[in-house]
Amino acid sequence: MNMEINLTESLCGFQRTITLLDGHNILINHPRGKPIVPDSYRCLKGYGMPNRHTHTNGDVIIHFNVKFPEENFIQTENQLKQLEEILPPRMGMKLESAEHYEEVKMMDYDSFEENSHHGDPDVDGEPAGVQCTTQ
């Protein structure tokens, strides 16, 4: 089963109800302080499909998708500073001198977009159409 939670729920805990295949309703209570990372799994032991050979129930596996906030969701510099004070420190690196490095800016990457142009002469810079052959 897939479950989408937001970043606040991941970090601060949440409650959700789930209706199982047999119609049974259960409440999931995930405690705060135990972050759920994106693309992780949790298990509800004994709440899955029954096994007629062992007369026990299997497990429900939940795959979590953690939804991050939209760009620029923080409105002020003060809010950003407060968030940075609360979160664990950055994993920064010590840079002795920036003069030996070229600073570059990252851009969003869309793998579908990149793959759709692969081999496209207009994008690859190659001439379009049928090429003349020499004899």
Image (cartoon, helix red, strand yellow):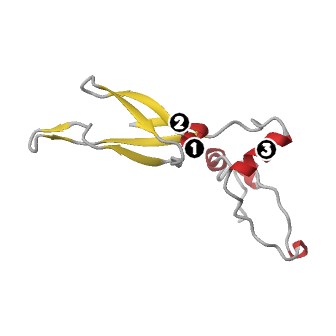
- Up-down relation of residue 16 to residue 62 (above or below): above
Residue of label 2: 5
Image quadrant assignment for residue 53: top left
Residue of label 1: 11
Residue of label 3: 80
Return the disc, 2 or 3, that comes first in the chain's sequence. Answer: 2
Q: Position of residue 24 (x, y in %)?
A: 27, 25
Q: Residue at x 74, y 51 (%)?
A: 85
* Viewer can see residue 129: no
Q: Residue furthest right?
A: 99
C-alpha span from label 3 to label 1? 17 Å
Q: Residues within 10 Å of mark 2 (few under 14, many from 20)?
A: some
Discs 1, 2 touching: Cβ within 8 Å:
no
Q: Residue at x 24, y 41 (%)?
A: 46
Between disc 2 and disc 3, the foreground one is 3
**Element assignment for label 2:** strand
C-alpha span from label 2 to label 3? 22 Å
Between disc 1 and disc 2, the foreground one is 1
- Up-down relation of residue 87 to residue 13 (above or below): below
In depth, the one of 111 and 75 nearer the eye is 75
